Amino acid sequence: MTPVSSILCPVDFSEGSRAALCYAAALADHFGARLTVITVNDPLLSKAAAMEILDPPLAAQSEAELRRFSDDVL
């Protein structure tokens, strides 16, 4: 069996991704693997956001929301 050293868990902030993150965290714990949680901004939304002056920028908002989501689930 190939050792598992890292697990990637993409999330979209839905209930399904909440469950997937719980499962990914359990697997990471079981295998002693590193867990990486990611989300992706829609390119069209990113372009529209770039035209507006956002404080903080969309990328920073997404990162903060991803951290809140992950902290809440884990």
Image: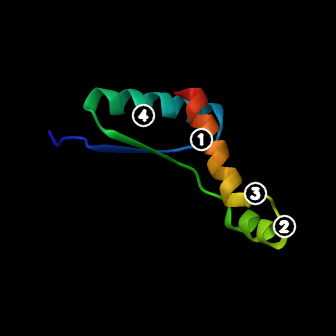
Residue 60 found in image quarter: bottom right
Residue closest to the eye, 43 or 65 = 65
Q: Which residue occupies 50% across, 33% down? A: 20
Residue 12 visible (yes or no)? no
Measured in 3D between alpha carbons, the distance from the residue under mark 4 to the one under mark 2, in whole angstroms, is 36 Å
Measured in 3D between alpha carbons, the distance from the residue under mark 2 to the one under mark 3, in whole angstroms, is 9 Å
> Mark 1 or 4 closer to N-term?
4
> Mark 1 or 3 closer to N-term?
3
Q: Is residue 52 left or right of residue 68?
A: right
Q: Is residue 56 left or right of residue 64?
A: right
> Mark 4 or 2 closer to N-term?
4
Dot 4 amino acid type: Ala
Residue 51 to residue 1: above or below: below
Q: Which residue is mark 2?
A: 53
> Mark 1 or 2 closer to N-term?
2
Asked which secondary structure carries label 1, the reply is helix
